[in-house]
Image (cartoon, rainbow, N blue to C red):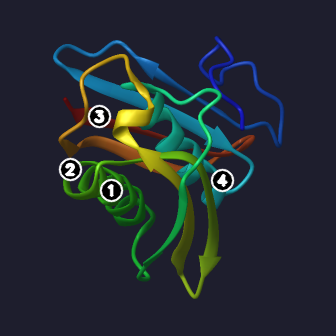
Amino acid sequence: MGGDTGDGGQGRQPGECGHRAVPHPGDIRIEAWAACREHCLAEAVLAMVESFADVSGVRPTAVDRVRLSEASDDDLLASLLDEIIFRLEAYGQVPVDVEADEADGGLDVRLAVTGIADVEITGAVPTAVAWNRLRIGPDPYGWSCAVTVDA
């Protein structure tokens, strides 16, 4: 897991991964970066979770798998974050670890989760993914993405 490196990914080296939340009026703007698309997507989930909850030191109570169908990279990012928001609202589940692997153009995701009551809430819980200014794609060091989530 990368976490916030403090430089917004600007001084990163090839193969490094990380994520951060950036100030955005009324919402949460997250950025993530990694060597490949799948790790970048996993970092985006961790960035969103860390924007509202402290999961450090929390052990998962269950492992769930999610399969996202073949779609554009933008659709995969939005769908994955929407799935995390759905699980928060419907089941009270918070991911503490995420692994994503490519599968026939889609995505296989393993979510190590715990109950929302088991984490410290530190900010507004996201409610939706905004398509405005959503981006994911290759960059000189691997992949990066940015997305705004409504809180």
Q: Earlier in the sequence, mark 3 or mark 2?
A: 2
Q: Earlier in the sequence, mark 1 or mark 4?
A: 4
As helix, strand or loop, the secondary structure at mark 4 comes to: helix
Callout 3 touching callout 1 (CB < 8 Å): no
The residue lying at 53 percent from left, 74 percent from top is 107
Q: Which residue is mark 1?
A: 78
Residue 118, horizontal then vertical, whole percent:
44, 34
How far is mark 1 from mark 4, CA to CA?
Answer: 15 Å
How crowded pointer 4 is (Cα within 10 Å; few <14, some 14-19, many 20+) is rated as many
Q: Which residue is mark 4?
A: 39
Q: Earlier in the sequence, mark 3 or mark 1?
A: 1
- 133 to the left or right of 12: left
The residue lying at 60 percent from left, 83 percent from top is 103
Q: Quadrant of the N terminus?
A: top right
- Closest to the camera, between mark 1 and mark 2, is 2
How crowded pointer 2 is (Cα within 10 Å; few <14, some 14-19, many 20+) is rated as some
Residue 81, horizontal then vertical, whole percent:
36, 52
Q: Which residue is mark 3?
A: 148
Residue 89 tag number: 2
Residue 18 vs residue 138, the one in the foreground: 18
Residue type indicated by callout 2: Glu
Residue type indicated by callout 1: Ala
Residue type indicated by callout 3: Thr
Q: Earlier in the sequence, mark 4 or mark 3?
A: 4
How far is mark 4 from mark 2, CA to CA?
Answer: 25 Å
How far is mark 4 from mark 3, CA to CA?
Answer: 19 Å
Q: Earlier in the sequence, mark 4 or mark 2?
A: 4
How crowded pointer 1 is (Cα within 10 Å; few <14, some 14-19, many 20+) is rated as many
Instruction: Write down the quadrant of residue 16 in the picture.
Output: top right
The residue lying at 71 percent from left, 32 percent from top is 2
Q: Quadrant of the C terminus?
A: top left
